[in-house]
Image (cartoon, rainbow, N blue to C red):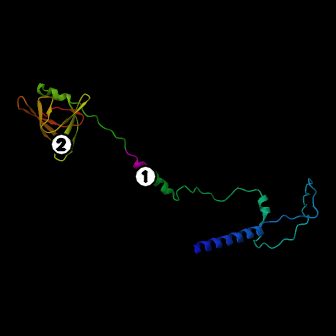
Amino acid sequence: MNRKRLILFILVILFVVAALWSYSAMPRPKTVSTLTYKPGQQAKPVIAAAVKPAREADDGTRLKISLLDTDPSGFKGYRRNIFKPVFVDELKVVKQQAVAIKPPPLIVPAAPVQQVVIQPETAPLARFTFLGFLKKGSVKTIFLAKEKDILLVKKGDKVAGRYEATDISEQALTLTVTDTGDEIVIPLLENRPLVPAK
Protein backbone atom coordinates (compact mmCIF):
# COMPACT_ATOMS: atom_id res chain seq x y z
CA MET A 1 0.00 0.00 0.00
CA ASN A 2 2.90 2.30 0.81
CA ARG A 3 4.34 1.79 -2.67
CA LYS A 4 1.09 2.75 -4.41
CA ARG A 5 0.88 5.96 -2.41
CA LEU A 6 4.45 6.83 -3.33
CA ILE A 7 3.76 6.32 -7.05
CA LEU A 8 0.58 8.41 -6.78
CA PHE A 9 2.46 11.21 -4.98
CA ILE A 10 5.18 11.26 -7.70
CA LEU A 11 2.55 11.42 -10.46
CA VAL A 12 0.73 14.33 -8.73
CA ILE A 13 4.03 16.24 -8.44
CA LEU A 14 4.76 15.62 -12.15
CA PHE A 15 1.27 16.87 -13.06
CA VAL A 16 1.72 20.07 -11.05
CA VAL A 17 5.15 20.71 -12.63
CA ALA A 18 3.74 20.15 -16.16
CA ALA A 19 0.79 22.50 -15.47
CA LEU A 20 3.14 25.27 -14.20
CA TRP A 21 5.49 24.86 -17.18
CA SER A 22 2.63 25.01 -19.72
CA TYR A 23 1.25 28.18 -18.05
CA SER A 24 4.64 29.90 -18.13
CA ALA A 25 5.24 28.91 -21.80
CA MET A 26 1.85 30.29 -22.91
CA PRO A 27 2.23 33.41 -25.16
CA ARG A 28 1.08 36.72 -23.66
CA PRO A 29 -0.76 39.41 -25.63
CA LYS A 30 1.28 42.59 -26.09
CA THR A 31 0.11 46.16 -26.60
CA VAL A 32 1.46 49.09 -28.59
CA SER A 33 1.22 52.72 -27.60
CA THR A 34 0.45 54.05 -31.14
CA LEU A 35 -0.59 52.32 -34.35
CA THR A 36 1.36 52.85 -37.57
CA TYR A 37 -1.79 52.66 -39.67
CA LYS A 38 -5.25 53.63 -38.53
CA PRO A 39 -7.96 50.94 -38.74
CA GLY A 40 -9.24 50.64 -42.34
CA GLN A 41 -6.22 52.39 -43.84
CA GLN A 42 -4.16 50.44 -46.42
CA ALA A 43 -0.42 50.16 -46.15
CA LYS A 44 1.58 52.05 -48.81
CA PRO A 45 3.77 49.87 -51.02
CA VAL A 46 7.46 50.31 -50.48
CA ILE A 47 9.14 51.65 -53.63
CA ALA A 48 12.33 49.86 -54.45
CA ALA A 49 15.47 51.92 -54.60
CA ALA A 50 16.32 53.12 -58.11
CA VAL A 51 19.98 52.55 -57.59
CA LYS A 52 21.01 48.91 -57.86
CA PRO A 53 23.08 47.73 -54.97
CA ALA A 54 26.71 47.01 -55.62
CA ARG A 55 27.26 43.55 -57.02
CA GLU A 56 28.42 41.21 -54.36
CA ALA A 57 30.41 38.08 -54.81
CA ASP A 58 28.12 35.02 -55.12
CA ASP A 59 29.08 32.48 -52.48
CA GLY A 60 25.95 30.31 -53.06
CA THR A 61 24.30 31.06 -49.73
CA ARG A 62 21.64 33.47 -51.09
CA LEU A 63 18.55 32.48 -53.03
CA LYS A 64 18.22 34.31 -56.36
CA ILE A 65 14.49 34.90 -56.77
CA SER A 66 15.04 36.95 -59.93
CA LEU A 67 15.80 33.72 -61.80
CA LEU A 68 12.15 32.71 -61.39
CA ASP A 69 10.99 35.67 -63.51
CA THR A 70 12.81 34.52 -66.67
CA ASP A 71 10.83 32.71 -69.38
CA PRO A 72 11.60 29.01 -69.48
CA SER A 73 13.09 28.01 -72.81
CA GLY A 74 12.74 24.51 -74.24
CA PHE A 75 15.60 22.08 -74.01
CA LYS A 76 17.50 22.14 -77.30
CA GLY A 77 19.95 19.36 -76.52
CA TYR A 78 19.89 15.70 -77.53
CA ARG A 79 16.67 13.83 -76.71
CA ARG A 80 16.44 10.04 -76.51
CA ASN A 81 13.53 7.65 -76.14
CA ILE A 82 14.36 5.81 -72.93
CA PHE A 83 12.07 2.91 -73.88
CA LYS A 84 13.80 2.24 -77.20
CA PRO A 85 16.42 -0.53 -77.21
CA VAL A 86 20.00 0.70 -76.99
CA PHE A 87 21.10 -1.19 -80.08
CA VAL A 88 19.10 -1.27 -83.33
CA ASP A 89 19.89 -4.97 -83.81
CA GLU A 90 18.03 -5.75 -80.58
CA LEU A 91 14.83 -4.43 -82.09
CA LYS A 92 15.19 -6.76 -85.08
CA VAL A 93 15.88 -9.72 -82.80
CA VAL A 94 12.77 -8.97 -80.73
CA LYS A 95 10.61 -8.81 -83.88
CA GLN A 96 12.07 -12.09 -85.15
CA GLN A 97 11.40 -13.78 -81.82
CA ALA A 98 7.81 -12.50 -81.83
CA VAL A 99 7.27 -13.98 -85.29
CA ALA A 100 8.97 -17.24 -84.27
CA ILE A 101 6.77 -17.63 -81.18
CA LYS A 102 3.52 -17.31 -83.14
CA PRO A 103 2.26 -20.89 -83.60
CA PRO A 104 1.16 -21.97 -87.05
CA PRO A 105 -2.59 -22.42 -87.49
CA LEU A 106 -3.75 -25.94 -86.72
CA ILE A 107 -5.40 -27.77 -89.58
CA VAL A 108 -7.19 -30.83 -88.30
CA PRO A 109 -8.09 -33.22 -91.09
CA ALA A 110 -11.62 -34.47 -90.89
CA ALA A 111 -11.84 -38.12 -90.01
CA PRO A 112 -13.22 -40.12 -92.94
CA VAL A 113 -16.71 -41.38 -92.32
CA GLN A 114 -16.72 -45.13 -92.53
CA GLN A 115 -19.71 -47.08 -93.63
CA VAL A 116 -20.56 -49.40 -90.78
CA VAL A 117 -22.36 -52.58 -91.61
CA ILE A 118 -24.27 -53.70 -88.55
CA GLN A 119 -24.99 -57.37 -88.22
CA PRO A 120 -28.45 -58.22 -86.91
CA GLU A 121 -26.89 -60.04 -83.93
CA THR A 122 -25.09 -56.87 -82.71
CA ALA A 123 -27.73 -54.32 -83.78
CA PRO A 124 -28.87 -53.53 -80.19
CA LEU A 125 -25.25 -52.66 -79.25
CA ALA A 126 -24.99 -49.98 -81.95
CA ARG A 127 -27.41 -47.82 -79.94
CA PHE A 128 -24.77 -47.50 -77.17
CA THR A 129 -21.94 -44.92 -77.43
CA PHE A 130 -18.66 -45.41 -75.56
CA LEU A 131 -17.84 -42.33 -73.42
CA GLY A 132 -14.80 -43.49 -71.42
CA PHE A 133 -13.62 -45.79 -68.68
CA LEU A 134 -12.54 -45.65 -65.04
CA LYS A 135 -9.93 -47.89 -63.46
CA LYS A 136 -10.08 -48.19 -59.67
CA GLY A 137 -7.66 -50.76 -58.36
CA SER A 138 -8.10 -53.87 -60.50
CA VAL A 139 -11.75 -53.10 -61.34
CA LYS A 140 -12.43 -51.37 -64.66
CA THR A 141 -15.72 -49.64 -65.36
CA ILE A 142 -16.78 -48.32 -68.77
CA PHE A 143 -19.37 -45.60 -69.41
CA LEU A 144 -21.90 -46.19 -72.18
CA ALA A 145 -24.50 -43.67 -73.29
CA LYS A 146 -27.90 -44.61 -74.74
CA GLU A 147 -29.84 -41.51 -75.78
CA LYS A 148 -29.88 -39.49 -72.49
CA ASP A 149 -29.08 -42.36 -70.12
CA ILE A 150 -25.57 -43.34 -69.00
CA LEU A 151 -24.88 -46.98 -68.20
CA LEU A 152 -21.93 -48.17 -66.07
CA VAL A 153 -20.64 -51.60 -67.08
CA LYS A 154 -18.21 -53.77 -65.07
CA LYS A 155 -16.98 -57.29 -65.71
CA GLY A 156 -19.92 -59.70 -65.28
CA ASP A 157 -22.66 -57.06 -65.93
CA LYS A 158 -25.30 -57.52 -68.65
CA VAL A 159 -25.74 -55.09 -71.54
CA ALA A 160 -28.99 -54.82 -73.53
CA GLY A 161 -30.42 -57.87 -71.80
CA ARG A 162 -28.60 -60.64 -73.73
CA TYR A 163 -24.88 -59.63 -73.66
CA GLU A 164 -22.61 -60.28 -70.69
CA ALA A 165 -19.30 -58.38 -70.26
CA THR A 166 -16.62 -61.07 -69.88
CA ASP A 167 -13.50 -58.91 -70.26
CA ILE A 168 -12.81 -55.17 -70.19
CA SER A 169 -9.49 -53.67 -71.24
CA GLU A 170 -8.42 -50.17 -72.24
CA GLN A 171 -8.66 -51.04 -75.94
CA ALA A 172 -11.58 -53.48 -76.20
CA LEU A 173 -14.72 -54.84 -74.57
CA THR A 174 -15.43 -58.55 -74.86
CA LEU A 175 -19.09 -59.58 -74.68
CA THR A 176 -20.63 -63.05 -74.64
CA VAL A 177 -24.07 -63.64 -76.13
CA THR A 178 -26.00 -65.49 -73.42
CA ASP A 179 -28.28 -67.31 -75.92
CA THR A 180 -25.65 -68.76 -78.24
CA GLY A 181 -22.40 -68.39 -76.26
CA ASP A 182 -20.71 -66.43 -79.11
CA GLU A 183 -17.96 -63.97 -78.19
CA ILE A 184 -18.02 -60.42 -79.59
CA VAL A 185 -14.93 -58.15 -79.32
CA ILE A 186 -15.74 -54.44 -79.59
CA PRO A 187 -12.92 -51.86 -79.90
CA LEU A 188 -13.43 -48.94 -77.51
CA LEU A 189 -13.25 -45.63 -79.37
CA GLU A 190 -14.45 -42.52 -77.54
CA ASN A 191 -17.78 -41.03 -78.69
CA ARG A 192 -18.27 -43.85 -81.19
CA PRO A 193 -21.05 -46.47 -81.21
CA LEU A 194 -20.27 -50.03 -80.10
CA VAL A 195 -19.47 -51.85 -83.33
CA PRO A 196 -17.71 -55.25 -83.27
CA ALA A 197 -14.28 -55.59 -84.88
CA LYS A 198 -14.16 -57.34 -88.25
Say which residue appears at 20% left-offset and 28% top-offset. 127
Q: What element carries label 2?
A: strand
- What is the quadrant of the C terminus in the image? top left
The mark that comes first in sequence, 2 or 1, is 1
Residue numbers of the magenta segment: 97-103
What's the mark number on residue 137? none
- Residue 35: give x, y in percent of width and height: 93, 61
Say which residue appears at 6% left-offset and 32% top-offset. 182
Judge by depth and name the residue closer to the eye, 44 or 81.
Answer: 44
Q: Is residue 93 visible?
A: yes
Lateral position of residue 195 relative to residue 35, left or right? left
95 up-or-down from 125: above or below: below
Q: What element carries label 1?
A: helix
The mark lying in front, picked from 2 and 1, is 2
Q: What residue type is labelled 2?
A: Lys
Name the residue that disc number 2 marks.
140
Judge by depth and name the residue closer to the eye, 45 or 119.
Answer: 45
The image quarter in which residue 158 lies: top left
- Residue 161: give x, y in percent of width and height: 13, 28
Magenta region, main secondary structure: helix
184 up-or-down from 100: above or below: above
- Residue 150: give x, y in percent of width and height: 24, 33
Q: Which amino acid does label 1 sit on?
A: Gln
Judge by depth and name the residue closer to the eye, 28 or 113.
Answer: 28
- Residue 1: give x, y in percent of width and height: 57, 72
Q: Is residue 40 magenta?
A: no
Assess disc 2: are there few (<14), some (14-19) or many (≥20) residues with their C-alpha within 10 Å of its C-alpha. some
